[in-house]
Image: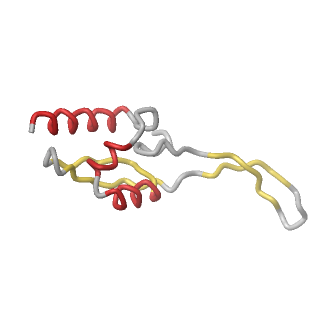
């Protein structure tokens, strides 16, 4: 399982661990990923996604999963999130 957020596309970064003696060695900064269940108001279903804590705050700020996916870029979303976005768009067009 890759360490990439399904909604924001945030992944591992690399940098240096710097000791007190200013020695530098490479390290990885991993995103804070959480397994959460988000509910779509339009579809009336829940979806289990692996997203970062920052993306979860953004989903709450924008007013839910439907509003977040409407504004999200397709290039940042995972395959599952793109499928959810398409299903929401179809349901809103039909309503």
**Residue 53, relative to residue 94: is it above or below?**
below
The quadrant the N terminus occupies is top left
Q: What is the residue that sits farthest to the right in this orientation?
A: 21
Give the residue displayed 45% in from the left and 53% down from the top.
52
Give the residue displayed 34% in from the left and 56% down from the top.
62
Q: How many marks?
A: 0
Residue 46 in the image: state x and y as whole percent: 20, 49
Q: Nearer the viewer, residue 82 or 2?
A: 82
Residue 72 in the image: state x and y as whole percent: 39, 42
Q: What is the residue that sits farthest to the bottom in this orientation?
A: 20
Q: What is the residue that sits farthest to the left in this orientation?
A: 95
Left or right of residue 22, residue 35 in this image: left
Colour scheme employed for the rendering of this structure? secondary structure
Residue 12 in the image: state x and y as whole percent: 59, 45
Give the residue displayed 41% in from the left and 37% down from the top.
77
Give the residue displayed 52% in from the left and 45% down from the top.
10
**Residue 67, relative to residue 61: is it above or below?**
above
Residue 78 in the image: state x and y as whole percent: 40, 36
Q: Nearer the viewer, residue 34 or 90?
A: 90
- Quadrant position of residue 60: bottom left
**Residue 45, relative to residue 95: is it above or below?**
below
Q: Nearer the viewer, residue 30 or 77?
A: 77
Left or right of residue 31, residue 1 in this image: left
């Amino acid at each position: 399982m890759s360490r990439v957020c399904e909604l924001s596309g945030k992944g591992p970064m690399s940098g240096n661990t710097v000791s007190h003696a200013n020695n530098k060695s490479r390290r990885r900064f991993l995103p804070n990923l959480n397994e959460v269940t988000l509910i779509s108001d339009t579809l009336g279903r829940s979806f289990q996604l692996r997203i970062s804590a920052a993306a979860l705050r953004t989903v709450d700020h924008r007013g839910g999963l439907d509003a977040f996916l409407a504004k999200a870029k397709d290039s940042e979303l995972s395959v599952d999130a793109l499928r959810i976005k398409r299903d929401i768009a179809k349901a809103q067009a039909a309503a």
